[in-house]
Image (cartoon, rainbow, N blue to C red):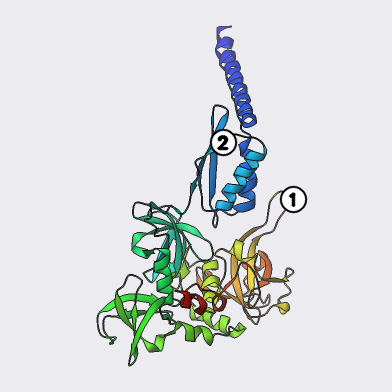
Amino acid sequence: MKLLRKIYLPFVLGVLLIASSCEENKESLEENPTDEHIAEVKKEYAPDSRVALFDVKTEKQGDSYILKGESNDPEAVESLKQKLQAENIKFTDSIRLLPDSEELENKTRGVVKISVANIRDEPKHSAQLVTQATLGMPLKVFKKKGGWYYVQTPEGYLGWVDYGGIQNMKEEELRSWKQTDKLIYLETAGFSYEEPDSDSQRVSDLVSGNILELVDRQGKFYEVKYPSGKKAFVETAYAQPYLEWLENLEATEEDLVATGKDLMGAPYLWGGTSPKGMDCSGFTKTVFFMNGVVIPRDASQQIHTGEEVDTERNFENLEKGDLLFFGKPATDSSAERVIHVGMWIGDNKFIHSMGEVHVSNFDTEAEDFDEYNYNRYLRTKRVLNKEDKGLIYLKQSDLFTLPEAEEVKM
């Protein structure tokens, strides 16, 4: 009997405790009517946490609630407040709206000042690399923690960059920077120098797509200035004035293929978007950027742009430059998972970053047939020259320069 009591009593008490806990949780949910509204707003304004921040919770205080957390979207915060007011829910707004201008001393903008800046998911060097931004890329700056800044890239990606990678600026300073003449570096990789002489001291390395302020031309060298203010010289054979490059840019299918092949052998790097190392979507992003188009960061985002051209492995319908997506199709119990992307180059072949940037073959009779990717193929999208809110065309953008009308006003 004592043995039964020893076994039975703890069991009963445990069941009662769990039941009590469940009841408390149930009551807690019922007592917090704000949760449903927060979820609704998050679904509408920030369904993808990679590109939108809406981290809001509530704390009950008497017959009212305190709204806590932070967001970089004032419209989302206002929507939540309106929903709560419509339900006559009393609240105090303590949400931190970003950017935090006071903390940043009004330097809510920034420009990448090194060849490639690493952007991580936490403010520490041991954190996961989520993306990269190249020299001259303007960033939004939302907050800081120690020597790290929480930033957003032009395509919307959020993450942390350390102080060594960014030149912090006020809005007016960024406008002034955009007014200057620019140079774009076109070689896959190279260097800038202290003097107009390739045997002089190197100032830094450079990669394709780097943007610098163009100061002057001296023979076979351009004199340039970094966002940090330091000056250097770049060989004219490997660079071009940005507006001249942009004016002559008429991206074609062949241009995309040529750019992709220029990156052959580049090592795979999770989070990488530069010739120093790139993941699959970082590769396609780099190819399109060097042809005047900023596309979304990840494969699961890129798949939502452009025009669908195939879902049935009818590869004869594909054109060079089309993006092929791979992963796991949706089932009755799970959603589709897009986990890889490559670019069609014709002749049943596509180029992609997987281990390294290389070409794979979809000819089922070929010795080098890529059966693995063939079996996980999902569909193909055509992005080149398509109008889409997820695409930024540099010819139509003020990303690096200001429109003439705005320059006159300044």
Q: Give the residue pinned by disc 2.
A: 91
**Disc 1 packing (10 Å; few <14; some 14–19; many ≥20):** few
Residue 169 in the image, given as x and y percentages of width and height: 38, 64
Residue depicted at 55% across the width and 52% down the height: 74
Q: Give the residue pinned by disc 1.
A: 332
Residue depicted at 26% across the width and 84% down the height: 195
Q: Nearer the viewer, residue 29 or 74?
A: 74
Residue type at the position of mark 2: Phe
> Would residue 131 appear left or right of 197 to someone viewing this image?
right
Residue 397: quadrant of the picture: bottom right
368 versus 44 height, above or below: below
Residue 30 in the image, given as x and y percentages of width and height: 65, 30
Which mark lies nearer to you, 2 or 1? 2
> Closer to the N terminus: mark 2 or mark 1?
2
Residue depicted at 46% across the width and 54% down the height: 99
**Disc 2 packing (10 Å; few <14; some 14–19; many ≥20):** some
Residue 55: mark in rendering: none
